[in-house]
Amino acid sequence: MSDFASALAGHLPGTWRSTQESFATFEDQFPRADQIWAYGSPGSALLDWHLEHAARLDGLAGQQLYVMPRPRYPHQFLVAPLKPEGVKPHHFRGVDEPHGIAVGDDPLRAAAAVARRVLPHYRRALDAVRDNARRQPDPPHRPAAPEVTEQLTLVWYPDGVVGAPYAKVPAPARTVLYGCYFQYSPHEAAFVLPASYGTAERALLLQRAVRLLTAQGIASTSATRPPPQLLRPARRWPCSARNRP
């Protein structure tokens, strides 16, 4: 293993240094398996077999390859890239993972295969990950909900209508309610969502209104519990501002 890895390093393009690694127990291999940056057999070999010996090849600009015996194939080895150090999980998003290959025990032929089939993909992936790290050092956390500046209480009335007295509706909320088919009823002095809409339509319109109100920092609460049928998932019914009175 050691002789092959050293000879392989000497035939790869550029300058590479080989470092022997030994695993006293099967479990000692697991941390290294997590660092393998290739799909398929290279990573699973460390998780499924006690290989005992392997080697790390260090090249220029932080490039690292891992060399290990190929289980069940006495005269073959697996060569795979290692994940770059100093980067975070979100830096790998959107990057095509490089791959490892199996090679024979002829170091010259193996080096030619690695140079042709592994290194180009590995370098492109490495550049992409480092570019992600430069552009977005920290994880992209989801933003917190907007700070609540207004509050709207919706009332479910005994006749099946849901709405709110006009005087209790914050001005920024009126456009949202209009867009979700609420109507202003002058003789009731209230915004109402008529019971003439079907159960599924009203459920979806209410869900949409609550989401849009929340996005504008308007908290919505219910003075009474809605009918059970409005708590069930509804089919799609988009809101629109086209039918404003």
Image (cartoon, helix red, strand yellow):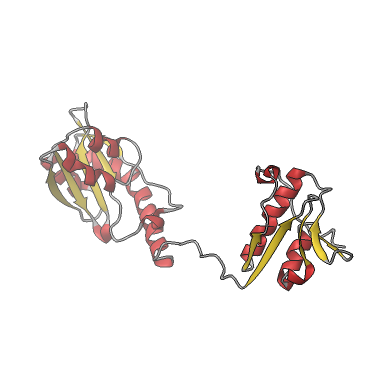
Please say if 61 is above or below 238: below
* Residue 133 sits in quarter: bottom left
Q: Is residue 182 visible?
A: no
Q: Position of residue 167 (x, y in %)?
A: 77, 72
Q: Residue furthest front?
A: 158
Residue farthest to the top, as pictured: 72
Please tell me which residue lies in front, 68 or 30. Answer: 30
Which of the image's four quarters has the N terminus?
top left
Instruction: Find residue 85 and report its horizontal and vertical position in percent.
Output: 28, 58
Q: Residue at 34% of width from left, 36% of height from top?
A: 40
| In front of the other: 37 or 6 | 37
Left or right of residue 49: residue 198: right
The quadrant of the image that shows the C terminus is bottom right
What's the residue at 30%, 40% (across, down)? 113
Count of numbered circles on the image: 0
Res 220 seen here: yes
- The reply, left or right, for residue 149 in relation to residue 127 is right
Q: Quadrant of residue 52?
A: top left
Q: Position of residue 59 (x, y in %)?
A: 23, 55
